[in-house]
Image: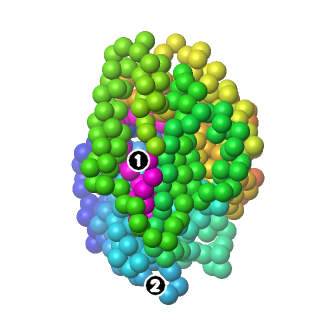
Amino acid sequence: MGSTTPLSPSWSNWAGNQRSAASTILRPRTIADITAAVQAAADAGGQIRPVGSGHSFTPVACADGSRMELTDLDTGVRVDRDRRLVTVPAGMPLHRLNALLAEHGLAMPNLGDIDAQTVAGAISTGTHGTGAAYGCLSTFVETLTLVTGTGEVLRCSTGEHPDVFAAARVSLGALGVLAEVTLRVVDAFVLRAHERPALLADVLADLPSLVAAHDHVEFFWFPYTDRVQLKINDRVPTDDRPLPRWRAWLDDDFLSNTAFAGLCRLGRAAPRLVPAIHAASARALSERAYTGRSDTVFCTPRRVRFMEMEYGLPRAALPEALAEVRRIIDRLPFKVLFPVEVRFTAADDIWLSHGYGRDSAYIAVHQYAGVPYEPYFRAVEEMATGLGGRPHWGKLHWRDAGSLAPTYPRFADFQALRARLDPHGVFRSPHLTTLLGP
């Protein structure tokens, strides 16, 4: 049986803006342990919140009942190299998954820029990377095993419980506990990364052809300037231009973390310097091109603490949205210390995916820890909502069920399925009640 701790220590997320203290910690080792815990909670009228690695900025993992940690869950690992399928416990962190796949000559088709999340946490919140031909990570799920609010164990796919499958791949933990996930992966591949400074106007003018011509495109706009850092990743046959270790340390460790943290602290202490800091940063970034194993190019270390909000928009709305973000930033009574990130994804058919039914452009706004952010984020949210935007489930936002329902065509279907799978409210929480209704 899994372990139970009567008095739990307090929990906080990576950013430090969400804290909770559960009455009990549950650490199941088997699916039977999960089932027993859920049935006990249902009988007692209690609640369980499954948690991952705490990389969401929202209260989605906050629990005042029982907190279920899946780090000890061992359902086994199965790799079908010929069919390019891998089955893993849902609590496995992405960095371990990437290492496992590499050992078998396999890889995830796409990834976001960090690999600290668990598989369950990443897919449940719609975590995504960038690439016009790729949906969020949930689109790579072939089958999943879900323990519902009654303790029933469902194995779901397009051919088995297809309605649950369409909903549970992005479900915020509202339908049950994800215990095991089978992912459709690809042969290991090499990426060529090309990063260069550019003018925002030039990138926007050329954006449709850029996004169509390359596998993965994103850019970072530096507030108070007309400049961006453009990042393009393309698949290539050979790893013939690896980044020297000293350059990787200089760019990704020292400049992107140590030096950037110092500049953020300077900007927080002396806000009048922020525009000059952005201008200098934008011009200091040099062009670089290198090759590497796909996950090592996709994922980079992030040690500077920040708050973040991200909105998925219809792709055609991006120029209007970016122009308004610039106006919002210029009107703020405080300075914005972080660049604005823009990424792209393909449409999918997952009920609560940000990309449901449409190709998307994502605008992510950040603010350094300890600096005001709410007026900035709320203004961007108001703009994005007016353009049909959908908030990233793992990033800060202030939407509720009433405002979300019109943006998701299958929202009512999700609510009905939630009522059927969790009739006793085992997985409800104040945050989920706000987002999904009672």
Callout 2: few (<14), some (14-19), or many (20+) C-alpha neighbours within 10 Å? some
Is residue 370 something one can see in this rendering?
A: yes
Q: Residue 200: percent from the left, percent from the top?
A: 61, 33
Label 1 is placed on what type of residue?
His
Label 2 is placed on what type of residue?
Arg
Q: Is residue 312 magenta?
A: no
Magenta-drawn segment: 288-311
Q: Is residue 283 above or below residue 311?
A: above
Q: Is residue 295 magenta?
A: yes
Left or right: where 326 falls relative to 194: right
Front in this rendered view, residue 65 or 300: 300
Circles 2 and 1: CB distance less than 8 Å?
no
Dot placed on the residue nearer the N-terminal end, 2 or 1:
1
> Which of the 4 image quarters holds residue 179?
bottom left
Residue at the image position 58 percent from the left and 51 percent from the top: 217
Q: Residue 232: percent from the left, percent from the top?
A: 54, 52
> Which of the 4 image quarters holds residue 212?
bottom right
Q: Residue 236: percent from the left, percent from the top?
A: 51, 67
Marks 2 and 1, how far apart at CA: 30 Å
Is residue 172 something one can see in this rendering?
A: no
> Which of the 4 image quarters holds residue 326?
top right
- Residue 55, labelled with which disc? 1
The residue labelled by disc 2 is: 81
Residue at the image position 44 percent from the left and 47 percent from the top: 288
Q: Quadrant of the N terminus?
A: bottom left
Residue at the image position 45 percent from the left and 52 percent from the top: 289
Callout 1: few (<14), some (14-19), or many (20+) C-alpha neighbours within 10 Å? many
Q: Residue 327: percent from the left, percent from the top?
A: 64, 21
